[in-house]
Amino acid sequence: MVAAVAVKDFVAVHGHPEEKHRHGNQQGDHWLKACSLQGKGRGFVATQRVAAGTRVHTAEPLAAVVSQEWVPETCAWCFHFTYPKRMRFKADITLPTTADPANNSTKRKKKQNALMTTTIKDVMFCSESCRKQFHFHGHSEDESNLLLRSYHALEQEYNSRQKQHREYPEECNDKDDGHDIQLFDSEQVDITDDDQLSHWINRIWTSITRYSCFVQSQQRWIPDNAERTMMRLVACCLARRQSEAEYLFSERQHQAAVPKFDDLLNVQCNELTYVRRILDGINSDGIKSSTDRATERKQRELPDELLHIINMYSFFVSATSSLFDCPHAVFRAIYFREMSNSFGLWEMSQQQQKEKYSKNSSDVAFSDDVDDASDDIGNVTDDLELLGWGIYPSAVYFNHSCKANVKKIRDGRNMVFIAKHDIEQGEEACISYGCIEDSVQERRKRLLEHYHFICACTRCEEESTVTNPQ
Ligand SMILES: [Zn+2]
Ligand SMILES: [Zn+2]
């Protein structure tokens, strides 16, 4: 395999950059081990007594992207943020000059003359070193090139739809947008049943994405910034998936070095929960029985939320079909994991930066107030910006507690987990998902909405018996 040889040469000369990077950050990972915990699924448990301030885990992203609105001012490698100054270094991409870029991906190395290198402005870096690290991250240069090409393709699709919209705005008001597709044709679906619901979801996606009238009308759909960011995150996962298929089988020694696409599948998929909630939302008139609801729903249109995600998929595929093989099941598998499992990558406060750069120890105790700002849901008290999103498969073992003993801090593109208090051997290590300042009712409501569980941590149990004595 040509691609693998090229990388092997690079590794022989320079060492595997990703590996070096990881070894530098791996200290501390022996403090915790993933176990199955009674009634809670899996979780991280301390293997020995851990002192407060210890760095207990470092998670590397499977995928990390800069939010669309901050692309010019944020380093795509280390997430250094310099607003209003723009980043100075641009990414290079190698594009085939032939009309059909799809059929020569494996011959790229041989056909040097059929390639052109160009810079793109969609991915920026703070330094030459960050630019290099980005280019050599993942499994190979081919992976990052594939990734950059997909970003570029998404950007081009976006620009061309915008142009079309400017030139023919009236066409965008057509009503034929898939809303008239009947939800539950002749059959009834019990949405409380996982199998029936997933079968239905599959069928809806397949029939809609094949319905040519719909597909045509959807070619005018234009994503917003959040959706563009999300699609790049999907592309990131797919580039890893594809490069594993091409590369890993011949280069097994590097398998441990980077998060693998399959690690993503360990992350909980929220599709069923999400769709169930949307379908329930169609009927907010309090009809209880699922049979009644299904009958009622027969006449209904496809819910906007679902149509929206299908639009995004259709956009994604029109942009990247020459680069990725992405059936809707794969897109959904990624999207519905990203949806509530990504960590926000926040701008660092000055305080945080000072601490990060003044002490070079692995046991740096970061101040508590900046911790909450690095969480992925709102309530940022400083006016820090949300610079991007990342998926950290190894961090899924941190369950939530409203009285967490571990906090997470962004370190470049990695997430570092630090003990807030002493943790006893055998004790579970938990983080807080988002802000935990609210009352127990509000916390539980938010956690249920975003993370789909009812919090039963010690703090919630205590506070709920105080507020609702039985
Ligand atoms: Zn950087
Ligand atoms: Zn709680």
Image: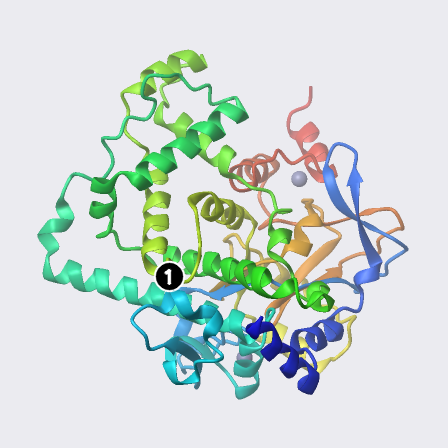
Q: Residue at x 26, y 30 (%)?
A: 181
Q: Which residue is drawn at 42% across and 12% down?
A: 291
Residue 86: image quadrant is: bottom left
Q: Which residue is drawn at 33% across and 66% down?
A: 155
Up/down of 40 relative to 424, above or below: above
Q: Is residue 420 left or right of residue 323?
A: right
Up/down of 239 relative to 111, above or below: above
Q: Look at the numbered disc 1 and give the secondary structure of its residue.
A: loop
**Which of the pair 12/340 is nearer the observer?**
12
Q: Where is residue 229 in the image (x, y as percent from the top left)?
A: 42, 60
**Where's ligand 1: which quadrant?**
bottom right
Up/down of 276 relative to 98, above or below: above
Quadrant in the picture for the C terminus: top right
Q: In this view, does 207 lie to the left or right of 425?
A: left
Quadrant in the picture for the N terminus: bottom right
Q: How is the image coloured?
A: rainbow
Residue 14: image quadrant is: bottom right
| Crowding near the residue tagged with mark 1, few <14, some 14–19, many ≥20 C-alpha atoms within 10 Å | some
From the image, tell me which residue sits under label 1: 322
**Which of the pair 148/82 is nearer the observer?**
148
Q: Where is residue 97 in the image (x, y as percent from the top left)?
A: 33, 77
**Which of the pair 263/398 is nearer the observer?**
263
Q: Which residue is drawn at 50% across and 58% down?
A: 238
Indicate the amino acid at tag 1: Ser
Q: Position of residue 236 (x, y in %)?
A: 50, 62
Task: Specify whether residue 69 is in view.
Answer: no
Q: How many marks can you see?
A: 1
